[in-house]
Every structure is written in C-alpha cells, then in structure tokens.
Amino acid sequence: MENEHLNNSTIFPLGQKVEANFIGDAYLQMVFTDPTPLNAPIGNVTFTPGARNNWHSHKIGQVLLVTGGEGWYQQEGKSAQLLKTGDVVNIPPNIKHWHGATKDSWFVQLAISPGETEWLEPVDDELYNKL
Amino acid sequence: MENEHLNNSTIFPLGQKVEANFIGDAYLQMVFTDPTPLNAPIGNVTFTPGARNNWHSHKIGQVLLVTGGEGWYQQEGKSAQLLKTGDVVNIPPNIKHWHGATKDSWFVQLAISPGETEWLEPVDDELYNKL
C-alpha cells in the first residue's frame, strides 16, 4: 500500500535511499544543482510513513515546498505543525528542528537549501509516537 | 474537460488570472515571497491548453520546475523543447524565450525568478500552431 501511495505522489524522481541522519526509509533526488542563477540547490525528499530526519539546523535557512502527502515540522520547544500538500515552510537559520512523514502517510517535499546543515541527535520514538 | 485536468494538477493554489504578457488563460499564485533565505521569489504558474507567455528575458535567469501537464520552452533561434512533469529548466540570463502549454494539455510549473523580467512581443499563432 505504501508503494502505491509513493507512485501516486511522484512528480520528480524518487532518487536514492538516504543512508545517514534519518530514521526510517527516506529517499533523495537532487533536481537542481547548477551554480547559477539560484543561491541554493533543490532536492526532492520522499519520506515513507513514520520516517523523519534527525534534529538539525541550517546555517542560512531552508525553504520546504510540500508536493505530496502529510508530515510534521517541529522547532525545538514548540508544538509540531502538521504539513499538507501545498504548504510552504520558511525555516529560519540556526533553529534546531526536524521534519518527516506522519505515521500513516508518505510525505514528499522539495527542499531548497542555501547553506550548510548541522546534524544532531535522532527524533526519538517517545516524542514521535505522541504526535 | 480542461477544468477537470486543472483540478487533477493542483498542488499549490491556482491564484489569479494573469492579465498581461500572456496569450490565452494563465494563472499565477506566488507561493514564496520572503526576502530570506533565497535570492528569488517562487510562483506557481498554470497555463490552460494553448496558453503561453510572450517572448521575454530574465536579467539574472530563471529556474522552472514542471509539476504537471505538458508544455513548450523555446529560446529564440532554436527548436521548441517539449516539457513534461518532473522536468527542470535552467533559463540563462538575457536569453529571449517563451514558455507555455501545448495545444492539448494544461501545464503547471513553479517559476523561481531571482531578477527582473523584460517583456517583449507575443508568440504569434503562426509559430505556435506549427509546434
């Protein structure tokens, strides 16, 4: 069933399985990496249900464009926000946060990332399972 | 039938009808306009079948991410390229070009536009109908 949903959501290629800094199965395909005219590369990130990235922060910030499914975005010390298809998130620089799928849904986003990322600890099951 | 297709393609809001520099019905919804962290705003552009923008050029360039349907991209003096869902186009600065839907398909793209646009003459039916 999960794969059926992924097939329905695919606009950009699924890409390769992400091997580090994530819990669960997630996939990354870079869709734009040219040095001009943007100040940022663009990646297509697909999270299977329950998958999420570790806590992390971006030195310049990041913009997420949600193209499919449902997921979570949470800044440290704040409530998690439910994200749906068509949502856009402006993640400020140097804010500890994570994002990922809900338990029951795949989640697909374009991530536009102008600077470096600092990776931190995983989002543990105790926090995630309460959402 | 056209509206049915539009409904199927909508990830980001359709927005308002574009009133200048286009032939046919096209719609624009800005989805990201914050001054940071990107060097460019992002617009969701939806062309109905047969709609296209006028010839134009971008002072810094533009990136198109095709999220639905089929369309054309043509640089002056070159053959038109057929674009499909998932295609990404890096439009160089100061290159005269146009983009739009095919005759038979809606066409939806995210346009990431870091600089000003210079608008020129319409793409006439003689050129478009030969595609």
Image (cartoon, coloured by chain):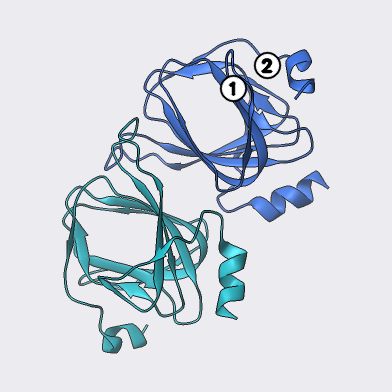
Chain colours: A cyan, B blue
Type of amino acid under label 1: Trp
The numbered disc on residue B98 is 1
Q: Nearer the viewer, residue B20 or A24?
A: A24
Distance from Cα at disc 2 to Cα at disc 1: 8 Å
Pointers 2 and 1 in contact (C-beta within 8 Å): yes
Q: Is residue B2 above or below residue A129?
A: above
Q: Is residue B73 above or below residue A84?
A: above
Read off the chain for label 2: B
Q: What x and y, as percent, mark residue A122?
A: 22, 77
- Residue B105 visible, this orientation: yes
Q: Secondary structure at mark 1?
A: strand
Tell me what residue is drawn at x 29 percent, y 51 percent: A62
Dot 2 or dot 1, earlier in sequence = 1
Q: What x and y, as percent, mark residue A84?
A: 49, 64
Q: Are marks 2 and 1 on the same chain?
A: yes
Type of amino acid under label 2: Val
Q: Nearer the viewer, residue B61 or A18?
A: A18
